[in-house]
Image (cartoon, helix red, strand yellow):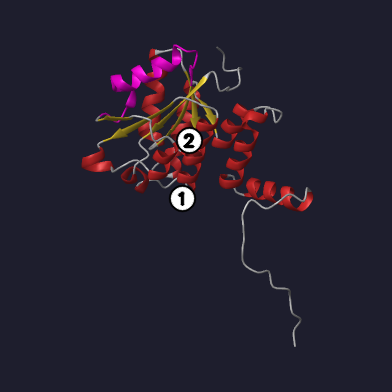
């Protein structure tokens, strides 16, 4: 496997690291509602393409709190791998879970986590030091305690060989071809819900250009304009 190989549903797996309230409280590098939107969108992308998904947690009861309900709702059957170390790679459960996917050819590890400069960075460096896995760090579904903390952690990881990506980039790389109709509708639905201006543009094109039906069902009246008196 090479870094020149694009992400596919067959060569990828997902890990979400510590998306918990106390960790999110400290994030200053990205708007926290945007962070949650992007994280949940990435999880939904993984579900569309049946990507094996791991969720790790740290000190849930004593410090960090419970994983975002919106994330758990997307993957309700995913085990929560609780640990004490800031570095997920230190926990054997995490290594075993990733090894299971890697044995199936899933050596491209897509990572979303908090905080970029601690949990993401130490996991990425340790994982690459011990294996031949490739790390794809989802920059806009991760957050640091400051803009500099996030930026320089990303820079350090890139220097070490981590590939920086965004959640929508991952989604579209997995889709690859709009002729793949089995996932087309779900991908478009995800874009409409989570992709901001892109999703709004899709809604506009469907309804105004192609004259398709709106994806909502408004039952109230539409009142005609009245001129000024």
Secondary structure of residue under mark 2:
helix
Q: Is residue 77 above or below residue 38?
A: above
Which residue is labeled 1 in the image? 33
Q: Would you say 38 lies left or right of 215 here?
A: left
Estimate the spatial distance between the alpha carbons at disc 1 and disc 2, rounded to whole Å. Answer: 15 Å
Q: Quadrant of residue 96?
A: top left
Which residue is labeled 2 in the image? 43
Mark 2 or mark 1, which is nearer the start of the sequence?
Answer: 1
Q: Quadrant of the N terminus?
A: top right
Q: Would you say 220 lies left or right of 81 here?
A: right
Which of the pair 19/177 is nearer the observer?
177
Q: Is residue 75 above or below residue 35?
A: above
Residue that appears at 53% across and 34% down = 45
Q: Is residue 126 above or below residue 187?
A: above
Q: Would you say 131 lies left or right of 49 here?
A: left
Q: Would you say 202 lies left or right of 62 here?
A: right
């Amino acid at each position: 496997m090479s870094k020149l190989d694009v992400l596919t549903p067959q060569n990828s797996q997902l890990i979400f690291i510590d998306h918990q309230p106390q960790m999110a409280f400290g994030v200053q590098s990205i708007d926290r509602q945007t962070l949650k939107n992007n994280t949940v969108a990435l999880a939904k992308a993984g579900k569309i393409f049946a990507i094996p998904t791991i969720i790790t947690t740290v000190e849930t009861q004593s410090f960090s709190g419970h994983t975002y309900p919106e994330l758990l709702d997307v993957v309700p059957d995913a085990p929560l791998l609780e640990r004490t170390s800031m570095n997920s790679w230190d926990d054997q459960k995490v290594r075993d879970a990733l090894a299971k996917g890697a044995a199936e050819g899933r050596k491209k590890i897509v990572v979303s986590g908090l905080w970029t400069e601690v949990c993401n960075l130490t996991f990425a460096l340790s994982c690459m030091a011990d294996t031949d896995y490739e790390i794809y760090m989802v920059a806009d579904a991760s957050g640091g305690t400051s803009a500099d903390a996030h930026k320089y952690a990303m820079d350090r990881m890139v220097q070490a060989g981590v590939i920086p990506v965004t959640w929508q980039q991952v989604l579209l790389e997995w889709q690859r071809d709009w002729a793949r109709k089995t996932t087309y509708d779900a991908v478009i639905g995800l874009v409409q819900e989570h992709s901001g201006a892109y999703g709004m543009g899709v809604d506009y094109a469907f309804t105004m250009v192609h004259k398709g039906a709106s994806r909502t069902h408004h039952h109230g009246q539409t009142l005609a304009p009245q001129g000024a008196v």
